[in-house]
Image: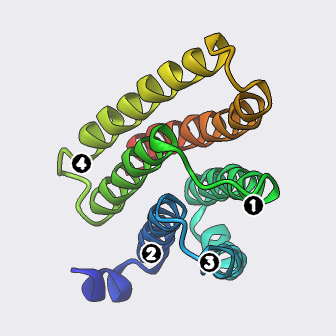
Amino acid sequence: MSLLLRFQDRPRYELRRLTLALAGICRSISASDTGTQKRFSRFSNAVDRALPLMRETGPGRTSLLAQLETAGGCLERTFLDLRLYELKPDDESIEVLLFTERALRLHADFIARPASNAAEEAAKNTSSASKSLALAIRAAKTDNGDFIHNLKFSRIYSGLEKTIYSVNDYTELLARTF
């Protein structure tokens, strides 16, 4: 399907490929992979290369690319915060990252086959990620044990929250565009 999509609708193929790349980055961060920074660089370069192609097809796909780039930027900020504080993702962050990864993979399926129910499933995954994150934020705010550690993770949770909002906006744009 992917090869066929590449020749029939190149902009859709590029969106699908970039969506899968961002899903891979979520998985990489959750696994504390050492190659994550290179993945972000490749993602950013691929977005830059795809922009002229998206501009040719109209504002709808350009908006999709911009929203995907926003989600990538939010995710990169979270990754850089983890590196700055020399932390690995905690269980809650891993859960949110995996829900987000699953949502992005479902988005890629939806891009390939818009008639599928993948968009609905993706929305459920972003909702689950949002609920898990809300619980983690609440727990961090009420825990009086290690203030500095909780403060660091509050910033990380904030970045993840922005990522989820961006992925949710991407879901809505996909539904309107395809």
Label number found at residue 129 = none
Q: Is residue 96 left or right of residue 79?
A: left
Q: What amino acid does circle 1 point to?
A: Arg
Label number found at residue 83 = 1
Residue at the spot x=28%, y=81% of the render? 2
Disc 4 crowd rating (10 Å Cα; few below 14, some 14-19, many 20+) is many
Mark 4 or mark 2: name the one nearer the start of the chain.
Answer: 2
Asked if residue 23 is positioned above or below residue 122 in the image, the reply reads below
Q: Position of residue 72 (x, y in %)?
A: 64, 58
> Of helix, strand and loop, which one carries label 4?
helix
Query: Which residue corresponds to mark 3?
Result: 53
Q: Position of residue 74 (x, y in %)?
A: 69, 49
Query: Which residue corresponds to mark 2?
Result: 17
Mark 3 or mark 1: name the one nearer the start of the chain.
Answer: 3
Given contact means CB atoms under 8 Å apart, are the residues at marks 4 and 2 in contact? Answer: no
Q: CA distance from mark 2 to mark 1?
A: 26 Å
**Colour setup of the view:** rainbow
Residue at the spot x=75%, y=60% of the render? 83
> Of helix, strand and loop, which one carries label 2?
helix
Q: CA distance from mark 3 to mark 2?
A: 14 Å
Asked if residue 36 is positioned above or below residue 81 in the image, the reply reads below
> Of helix, strand and loop, which one carries label 3?
helix
Given contact means CB atoms under 8 Å apart, are the residues at marks 1 and 4 in contact? Answer: no
Given contact means CB atoms under 8 Å apart, are the residues at marks 3 and 2 in contact? Answer: no
Q: What amino acid does circle 2 point to?
A: Arg
> Of helix, strand and loop, which one carries label 1?
helix
Q: Nearer the viewer, residue 84 or 106?
A: 84
Q: CA distance from mark 1 to mark 4?
A: 33 Å
- For the residues carrying marks 3 and 2, which lies nearer the camera in this image? 2
Query: Which residue corresponds to mark 4?
Result: 118
Instruction: Identify the residue at the far top of this view.
Output: 142
